[in-house]
Image (cartoon, grey):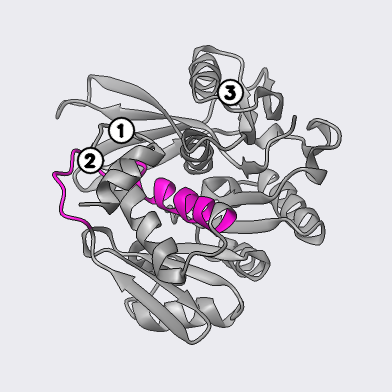
Amino acid sequence: MFPTFVAAGEALTDMVVQDGAQQHWRSLTGGSTWNVARAMARLDVTTAFAGAISQDVFGDALWQASEQAKLDLRFLQRYQKSPLLAIVHRTDPPAYFFVGDDAADLHFDAAQLPQGWRAHCQWAHFGGISLAREPLAGKLVALAEQLKQDGVRISYDPNYRLLMDERYDATLRRMTGLADVVKVSEEDLAGLFRTGDIAAAFDTLRSWNPAATYLYTKGGDGASLHIGDNSWSLPAPRIEVIDTVGAGDASIAALAWSMMHRAEATPLQHLQFSVAAGAAACLGAGASPPSLRDIENITNM
């Protein structure tokens, strides 16, 4: 049995400062694409995360969390290389940098994935810093191109980080052109296009692939869905937010789930499901992928 949904990219360890003197740190498993895989698996879809992790204690934690999430571990590769770490040295506002020269994630090899898997894959997700780290980025773009030719639906969430400077521009344009669904936030647009004119940045992004569906998330202000000349908007549900970690990852996973499993749903219903999932992810500490029941509870509020 092969997964119908595959997210390919990075799994990493967040090292989050716990005190003002920066003497105490907390390690958390994470990674944008890895979180999307976990969110989809939580929705009872056969799912894999395709990527590479280290063979040390950090890699062990990611392996165990992947196993607990019921991801297909045949797609998770391990190498005797350094772990990829995100050092979050300030939390409000967030400030961070990455440590991962020649780290395990860069050695991912799509040729080593289980033979025959592509024939069963219905949807593949890409994004995060994996697409800004060579040589991994080139491998992932090539994989996305192969899957697109196979008729697999592609979603893409750039998930802007500081290392996505002008060197990332070509990848941004190529992945947007390949994707059936693109998720983007106001912060993404400001950072990726290095501009304060967010509306113009969004128009430019959409011009690169007018046929795609765009999920535009706006945090506490909700989200909008854009298809061709039409758009639908919804406010964020009124909830008591614990934290917002993983909310965007849950929202794109839920949109993909809805489009895969509810072909008869309207765009507004797809958006409603996505927005509810993002809100439900905010009800727990850390990246807390919501279940179908969690999402339905928000939807019925």
Is tag 3's residue or tag 2's residue first in the polypeptide sequence? Answer: 3
Q: Nearer the viewer, residue 88 or 296?
A: 296
User: In which quarter of the view is residue 88 placed?
Assistant: top left
What's the amino acid at mark 2? Asp
Q: Is residue 122 left or right of residue 90?
A: right
Q: Secondary structure at mark 3?
A: loop
Q: Which region is colored magenta?
A: 237-260
* Residue 191 x/y as whole percent: 40, 64
Is tag 1's residue or tag 3's residue first in the polypeptide sequence? Answer: 3
Report if residue 188 is visible in the image: no
For residue 286, the mark is 1
What's the amino acid at mark 1? Gly
**Pointer 3: what residue?**
82
Q: Is residue 43 left or right of residue 147?
A: left
**Pointer 2: what residue?**
243
Q: Residues within 10 Å of mark 3 (few under 14, many from 20)?
A: some
Is tag 2's residue or tag 1's residue first in the polypeptide sequence? Answer: 2
For residue 127, the mark is none
Q: Residues within 10 Å of mark 1 (few under 14, many from 20)?
A: some
* Residue 47 x/y as whole percent: 61, 36
Q: Is residue 94 above or below residue 272?
A: above
Q: Nearer the viewer, mark 3 or mark 2?
A: 2
CA distance separating discs 2 and 1 = 7 Å
CA distance separating discs 3 and 2 = 29 Å
Q: Is 243 in the magenta?
A: yes
Report if residue 58 is visible in the image: yes
- Which residue is drawn at the image coordinates 22% and 65% (left, top)? 221
Q: Secondary structure at mark 1?
A: loop
